[in-house]
């Protein structure tokens, strides 16, 4: 999949009130958009499990939540 620094994780709230996550390449291309999650923590947990499953990085909830706090809260169209 590439180096962990090649990707960013954009958490956002959809019009339905659910939390979604986009996995984006550093070039801006969205590679994946998740299903909706009823809580932010459920989205974080799923992303953390995904990252571990693909041996991407040793991501922790703290690292992912820190990135969540720094991202915009776009509304899904």
Image (cartoon, helix red, strand yellow):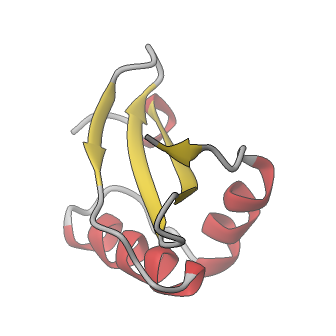
Query: Going by the image, does 11 lie left or right of 48?
Result: right
Q: Quadrant of residue 67?
A: bottom right
Say which quadrant the N terminus sits in.
top left
Residue drawn at point x = 54 percent, y = 85 percent: 39
Looking at this view, is 71 or 39 the one in front?
Answer: 39
Looking at this view, is 23 or 36 the one in front?
Answer: 36
Q: Quadrant of residue 23?
A: top left
Residue drawn at point x = 62 percent, y = 44 percent: 74
- Residue 48 versus residue 55 in the image, above or below: below
Q: Could you tell me how many numbered marks the image carries?
A: 0
Say which quadrant the C terminus sits in.
top left
Query: Going by the image, does 38 lie left or right of 11?
Result: left
Where residue 48 appears, as percent x and y from the top left, is: 42, 74
**Residue with the most extreme top position:** 27
Residue drawn at point x = 56 percent, y = 55 percent: 11
Where residue 28 appears, as percent x and y from the top left, is: 45, 18
Query: Going by the image, does 23 lie left or right of 63?
Result: left
Q: Quadrant of residue 13?
A: bottom right
Where residue 65 appears, as percent x and y from the top left, is: 68, 70
- Residue 70 versus residue 28 in the image, above or below: below
Where residue 46 appears, as percent x and y from the top left, is: 36, 78
Residue drawn at point x = 61 percent, y = 66 percent: 64
């Amino acid at each position: 999949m590439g180096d962990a620094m090649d990707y960013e994780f954009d958490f956002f709230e959809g019009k339905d009130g659910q939390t979604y996550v986009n996995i984006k390449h550093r070039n801006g291309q969205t590679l994946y958009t998740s299903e909706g999650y009823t809580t932010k923590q459920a989205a974080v947990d799923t992303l953390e499990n995904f990252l571990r499953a693909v041996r991407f990085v040793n991501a922790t909830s703290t690292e992912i939540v820190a990135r969540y706090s720094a991202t915009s809260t776009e509304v899904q169209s």
